[in-house]
Amino acid sequence: MGLFDDISSQMKNAMRAKDKPRLSALRGIRAAFLAATKKDNSKSLADETCIELLRRLEKQRGESIAAFEAGGREELAAAERAELSVIQEFLPSLADEPTTRRWVEEAIAATEASSPRDMGRVMGAVMKAHKGELDGALANKLVKDLLAD
């Protein structure tokens, strides 16, 4: 069962269990999926597309949490954290730092980058090769560190 169908079945389970916070988060995920299907009039989405959408939702929730905490709205931040934990259940884990470092080093070698000016080429290569598998912020930091030497 793909992620698209899994979200729908999880939604039904949450309705039966009367788990309102989980149901709310799953409805948000499903709404994002349905909006994406309407763009190309498809009936379902590939898992890669679902993961991209989930990563976007994860990033949005993280930004919302930070904004609510900065504004002193802890109850709203807690609701966003609950939704974030549901979103993260469906996401594969990201590569750890040593793996990301190895991928960045391979991209630097492949692009023959030698200075910080080549950062865009390196980031483009590593993100294209490992899309959805690594944290872009970590990769960016590692590229900066390795090209600064």
Image (tube, rainbow, N blue to C red):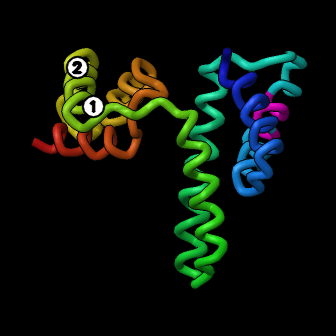
Q: Residue at x 85, y 16 (%)?
A: 42
Separation of marks 1 and 2 at Cα, in angstroms:
10 Å
Given residues 33 and 8, the one toward you in this image is 8
Q: Residue at x 82, y 42 (%)?
A: 16
- In this rendering, the answer to whether 25 lies above or below 81 is above
Give the quarter of the figure containing the C terminus. top left
Q: Residue at x 32, y 43 (%)?
A: 138
- In this rendering, the answer to whether 44 lies above or below 24 is above
Most extreme residue toward the left is 149
**Residue matched to label 2:** 106
Where residue 85 sits in the image (x, y, percent)? 55, 50
Report which quarter residue 26 is drawn in.
Answer: top right
| Number of the front mark, 1 or 2 | 1
For numbered disc 2, what is the local secondary structure?
A: helix
The reply, left or right, for residue 115 in relation to residue 33 is left
Span colored in magenta: 31-36
Where residue 53 sits in the image (x, y, percent)? 65, 35
Give the quarter of the figure containing the N terminus. top right
- Prevailing secondary structure of the magenta residues: helix
Which label number is shown at residue 27?
none
Which label number is shown at residue 100?
1
The reply, left or right, for residue 91 in relation to residue 113 is right
How many dots with numbers?
Answer: 2
